[in-house]
Amino acid sequence: MYRGVYTALVTPLAENNRVDEKALRELVEFQISGGVAGLVPVGTTGESPTLTREETQLVIRTVVDQVNGRVPVIAGAGANSTEKAIEQVISAAELGVNATLQVVPYYNKPTQAGLIEHFSMIAEAADLPMVLYNVPGRTGVALQNESILTLAKNPRIAAVKVACGNIPGIMDLISQVPDDFTVLSGDDNLTFPIMTLGGHGVISVASNLYPQLVSQMVSRCLSQDWEKAREIHYRMLPFFKSLFLESNPIPIKAAMAMKGYIKEFYRLPLCGLSTEHRRELERIIEECEHPELISAAQ
């Protein structure tokens, strides 16, 4: 089962708009030293829509090589074309990943029957576990609980990343999934409540910058130390919320650049954080890293 924190890695870019392989390798080391359970390259946070096929392979290959078997690598390989998704799964498998992340097809808005057939066909394409990704705010269609439960019967479909914000629906899902099926939060700000309901961890954006803190919170949840987990949750909550100031991954890349982990470059149509939001993000990071400032201001 997939338990713990899996970082949805940003893709560092250099001045020439190419993938910054050195920064990516350093980011992998930073994540592993911070105690994350696994890494998720080339997802939405990794700006996958604007990476070429060659760049996608470069990022996956680099992450797999740098990880060197220390933690699982779950590569984003989804598409709104079943045939294209299958091609990407086969490519990811050849590059040595441990599993793939499969987003609900976007824009073409398939029916639930179409979604079940889509994911089932992808699952047969390679001998790799699959993590479903339900994010209706980006895809325009939700993967319903009934469909997830049907897909969970497939031995290669091992987990779901839920980023729908529907706590009652997530609660109902957790109560019905098989014991060997993992439910992971896809929203950092909802990780703690989802885990109190029986979730198993998070595919996290925030852990790009704070792998140790997010890992500590999730570890406390898994050991049912709810008091300490709650304390970390509320300390981190303003930062979790700040990741929605503008479209992901703009805020997290800006935050990481502020702390010197990457250079702040994006692929159009994404662009830099606004001046107003940058000031707000700087303040939130300062208070997150120095919580005594919050008490002093109150």
Image (cartoon, helix red, strand yellow):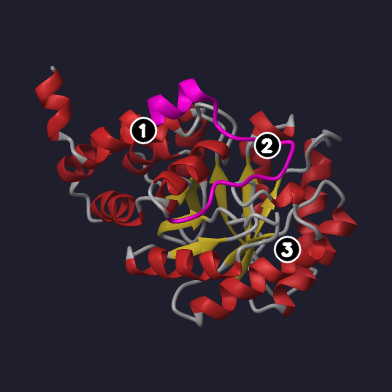
Could you say whether the residue bearing mark 2 is in a helix, strand or loop? loop
Please say whether residue 262 is one of the residues in the magenta stretch.
Answer: yes
- Inspect the image, locate mark 2, and give the three-letter code of the amino acid beneath it: Leu
Q: Say left or right for 24 vs 18.
A: left
Tell me the residue at 53%/52% (across/down): 263
- The numbered mark, 2 or 3, whose residue comes first in the sequence reads 3
Q: Say left or right for 294 vs 7.
A: left
Q: Say left or right for 231 vs 153.
A: left
Of residues 77 and 281, which is closer to you in this image?
A: 281
Q: Is residue 1 visible?
A: no
- The numbered mark, 3 or 1, whose residue comes first in the sequence reads 3
- Inspect the image, locate mark 3, and give the three-letter code of the amino acid beneath it: Thr
- Crowding around mark 1 (Cα neighbors within 10 Å: few <14, some 14 to 19, many 20+) is some
- Inspect the image, locate mark 1, and give the three-letter code of the amino acid beneath it: Glu
The quarter in which the C terminus is drawn is top left
Quarter holding residue 141: top right
Where does label 3 land, which residue? 56
Q: CA distance from mark 3 to mark 1?
A: 31 Å
Looking at the rendered structure, which numbered label has been put on residue 270?
2
- Contact flag, marks 2 and 3 (Cβ < 8 Å): no
Where does label 1 land, which residue? 282
Please say whether residue 277 is one of the residues in the magenta stretch.
Answer: yes
- Contact flag, marks 3 and 1 (Cβ < 8 Å): no
Q: Say left or right for 9 vs 195.
A: right
User: As drawn, which residue projects farthest toward the front?
Assistant: 15
